Amino acid sequence: MTFSSYFYVMTKQELRKKYKDLRKTITQDQLEDLSIAIANNVLQLPIWEYSFYHTFLTIEEQKEINTDYLLNILSGKDKNIVISKSDFTTLDMTHYLLTDNTRIKKNNWNIPEPVDGIEIATEKIDVVFVPLLAFDVKGNRVGYGKGFYDRFLANCRPETITVGLSFFEAENTIEAISKNDVPLDYCVTPEKVYEF
């Protein structure tokens, strides 16, 4: 019997459930503290010489990382901040510059999105902060399962830097990685920075 037969690897569905359940146990105060720790650790990354930084806006109902702290860092560094609007029929995202005039509205899935604005081409984006539920030590990630970010990242330039943000540390391995799954360059947790 080989060692691997003792070693149980969770499926993506099991990982989604595990980490959604773990998120539910985080209090609002903990969520803010962990989000601040993540934002502070992002400052250690060698990514600050670029212009266009794409980030997700927090889905509060999913207990996602509060990206307001990251937005404050980006605007403090005078970066162009890019946010997206999701099309659930095509599963594609359109990207817009976040400005003082941008109107944000939640869609039917509680995702805060720009109503309209200045559209930014995917090829212009230098750094992408990627939402996730779980990730492993090789930089593979598990998202919500719709593939929005894998499609988006596949259309970015090869040198675009991808940074996952996670409340939790890495899994050893994620099984059933498909050729469409785009791995991360970094993942930042409250405790540490992973480089892949």
Image (cartoon, grey):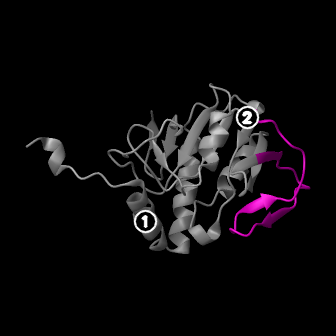
- Residue 6 covered by magenta stretch: no
The quarter of the displayed image where residue 137 is located: top left
Q: Residue at x 90, y 50 (%)?
A: 117
Q: Residue at x 35, y 49 (%)?
A: 171
* Placement of the N terminus among the 4 image quadrants: top left
Which residue is at the front of the view, 189 or 37? 189
Q: Main secondary structure of the magenta part?
A: loop
Residue 17 disc label? 1
Q: Is residue 64 above or below residue 172?
A: below
Question: CA separation, marks 2 and 1?
Answer: 31 Å
Instruction: Assign a secondary structure to mark 2.
Output: loop
Badge 2 density bin: few <14, some 14–19, many ≥20, Cα 10 Å: many
| 10 relative position to 193: left or right | left
Q: Which residue is mark 2?
A: 125
Can you give x and y, in whole percent of width and height, for residue 26 in the image? Answer: 47, 71
Q: Quadrant of the C terminus?
A: top left
Q: What is the span of residues highlighted in magenta in the rendered image?
A: 94-122
Residue reaching furthest to the left: 1
